[in-house]
Amino acid sequence: MQSCEPSGDSADDPLSRGLPRRGQPRVVVIGAGLAGLAAATALLKQGFTDVTVLEASRHIGGRVQSVRLGHATFELGATWIHGSHGNPIYHLAEANGLLEETTDGERSVGRISLYSKNGVACYLTNRGRRIPKDVVEEFSDLYNEVYNLTQEFFRHGKPVNAESQNSVGVFTREKVRNRIRDDPDDTEATKRLKLAMIQQYLKVESCESSSHSIDEVSLSAFGEWTEIPGAHHIIPSGFMRVVELLAEGIPPHVIQLGKPVRCIHWDQASARPRGPEIEPCGEGDHNHDTGEGGQRGESPQQGRWDEDEQWPVVVECEDCEVIPADHVIVTVSLGVLKRQYTSFFRPCLPTEKVAAIHRLGIGTTDKIFLEFEEPFWGPECNSLQFVWEDEAESCTLTYPPELWYRKICGFDVLYPPERYGHVLSGWICGEEALVMERCNDEAVAEICTEMLRQFTGNPNIPKPRRILRSAWGSNPYFRGSYSYTQVGSSGADVEKLAKPLPYTESSKTAHGSSTKQHPGHLLSSKCPEQSLDPSRGSIKPMQVLFSGEATHRKYYSTTHGALLSGQREAARLIDMYRDLFQQGP
């Protein structure tokens, strides 16, 4: 596993060029999710004191969203700690007692299926029939064999043939279909059921990858995503507790909530002496609210600067406040970058970074929680999986808007019931999830109830007493759940997305991350201001840095990938200033 600790690779060129004549660099972190909080925490621990975190929403956590209902906590976002051996999220949770109440049903050593491992999965067809257990087991074994083949193209450098279209879904569907059709022992009816099960499994795979369809996921890059060894865990008290632990070491005034950013003006000092050309805002437009539990604050220097100072970056906020900075760490989601990159950066992003944003994928995976007065499922049932028998020959996972509910792959049973009550957790992804988000709660609850009645063959299932669901795709601050390597993209695009601006010839600035531990505070009042003398050059290094799960080549789509990416970008700055102070005046 990649180390979370910063490294100390030496740079080929001095990184002290063009920094302002001030003892403390100003760093603005955009986003208070796991990546942003990890970056801010790492910088503060090393003695950086001029750090500001701007969060567009009214709460910290990003795509971690734990909702407390009654005695239970439900996760609308991140749910699992994926792996334990060397996983910083696991170690943080374990060290702080967050896993003490985790049950065996909330701990999995195998490949997890979205939520629950306790009990038996019930595969039901739209004709109200349960698929026999032996048929399910035979199909599952076959599917897993083919799934393992999808990993070999990247890991062993196997060439991808044209028939697969470099698609995980196309390859898997055809391989599994051919083996089912060639099986001499199955009856035609059994083959038909197994062929229909392919689509259900691929819907689950689409939800896990957060793609519209697993057909859009790159086969040649699929195996680069790396699973951390060890069990997967659920945090009974909520994943938000990890976020709160990360934020504990950050002074309240550092984090400003309800502070969306309009534009990042970078490379300013080399372009003009006194800041960007920004449309002026009227008096009283600035939002300096210090509410939200003491999490918001304002640096006394924000919004103005000395005309003789050259700031390489200026952050323009939606409330018209402008914040000059030496460095900005951008942690916004890939979905936001795809939607706003043309207006979010001035000057425009380099061509190769724009191309990487276009090639990489991000989709929406939503959850639908349904709470019932009493369970209508058996005590051994851990999930209700929906298999549409008329999809045995289907080659698509896309449905017209009026049939959006067909993308729901099934409902997991939340365990233990003593904690959660009688709750089912449904899963839907892609464009169909966006249609679901536009429906009201009553309509979604009605459709889900009808599906449960149809697939179980029980017309007496009551409507749920309560519904709770996520809406990641339509949320303007996320525009999706998490990233994946889309057909046509590769891990190289992840590296390009993570590359700091402006580009330099220094391998450290462009690609470096760290392995050395930095003892003690790096920055203090004793640090020589002369080492920050701008007379050493005109290039302002690492003005804009990028982190977030989509920027981690091995662990994209995960919470530990997000956290490690934030630490990685903080390490770049820590290394740079350490080198400056070692050089001296």
Image: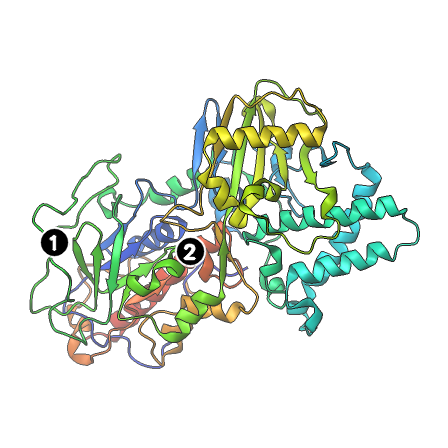
> What amino acid type is highlighted by mark number 2?
Gly
Residue 264 drawn above or below residue 288: below
Q: Quadrant of the C terminus?
A: bottom left
Which residue lies at the image location 45% right of the left edge and 41% below the top edge?
Answer: 471
Task: For mark 2, give the secondary structure.
Answer: helix
Query: At x 26% / y 54%, what residue is drawn?
Result: 261
**Residue 59 screen position, x and y as percent:** 33, 40
Residue 64, numbered circle: none
- Which residue is more in the foreground, 146 or 198? 198
Considering every residue shown, the one lying at the far right of the view is: 185
Task: Give coordinates of residue 145: x percent, y percent.
Answer: 76, 56
The image shows residue 514 at horizontal and vertical percentages of 42, 66
| In the rendered image, the vertical position of residue 227 relative to residue 372, given as above or below | below
Which mark identifies residue 335?
2
Image quarter of the N terminus = bottom right
Q: In this figure, which residue is indicated by the disc labeled 1?
A: 281
Q: How is the image coloured?
A: rainbow
Q: Point out the tag, 2 or 1, that comes first from the N-terminus.
A: 1
Q: Is residue 422 left or right of residue 75?
A: right
Is 183 on the left or on the right of 85, as rendered? Answer: right
